[in-house]
Amino acid sequence: MTPVDLATLIVGLSLAGAVSAQAVHSDIAFGFRYSASVRDEERSDVLSRRLARVVRNQVEGVAMFAPIAILAGSGSENGVLGWACLVYAASRALHGILQAFGAGPIRSITWLTGFAALLVAYVNAALTLA
């Protein structure tokens, strides 16, 4: 398994974990009957709103990460790209956990770290393909 493969696995598991946490919290906080309904009546608490943001952030992260993972799969992976992807994936996973617990300043640092790693990955991929 390459570093980019591992990073892709981490990114996917982070999204699956966020969706699962949101669903479990909804079942516990509002009951399974509400979770299984069409949810015309909005119910939320602080944690459910945070978890909704985590899911949305993870989906946005997948959309930014997917092109790099696809490029790496086409044979343009190297050490810098692999490490950048791993740093990105780890920071996104940590960012989701910190978002759920409301740790603002540290969460922002993980977001910046992940975004910087993603930029490094994109620049590295562009230079490798040029």
Image (cartoon, rainbow, N blue to C red):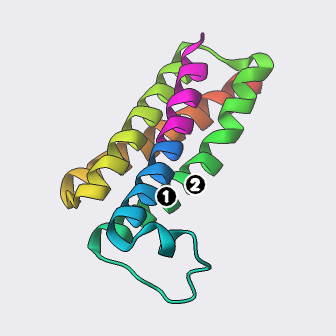
Please state the horizontal and vertical placement of residue 25, each as a whole percent of the image: 37, 60
User: Farthest top residue?
Assistant: 1
Q: Is residue 1 left or right of residue 27?
A: right
User: Farthest bottom residue?
Assistant: 41
Above or below residue 30? Residue 130 is above
Residue drawn at 50 percent across, 53 percent down: 19
* Magenta highlight on residue 77: no
Above or below residue 31? Residue 8 is above
Q: Report helix, strand or loop for mark 2.
A: helix
Task: Magenta stretch: give its range.
Answer: 1-14
* Quarter of the image with the N terminus in it: top right
Q: How far apart are marks 2 and 1 (CA)?
A: 6 Å
Q: In this view, does 16 lie to the left or right of 69?
A: left
Above or below residue 113? Residue 54 is below
User: Farthest front residue?
Assistant: 33
* Quarter of the image with the C terminus in it: top right
Q: Is residue 66 left or right of residue 110?
A: right
Please state the horizontal and vertical placement of residue 87, each as a whole percent of the image: 42, 30
Between 96 and 49, the one lying in front of the other is 49
Residue where numbered disc 1 is placed: 55
Labels 2 & 1 near each other (Cβ < 8 A): yes
Residue drawn at 52 percent across, 46 percent down: 15
Residue drawn at 39 percent across, 33 percent down: 90
Between 16 and 5, the one lying in front of the other is 16
Q: Is residue 109 left or right of residue 88?
A: left
* Magenta highlight on residue 2: yes
Residue where numbered disc 2 is placed: 59
Q: Which amino acid does label 1 sit on?
A: Val
Q: Report helix, strand or loop for mark 1.
A: helix
Please state the horizontal and vertical placement of residue 13, each as a whole percent of the image: 51, 36
Q: Which amino acid does label 2 sit on?
A: Val
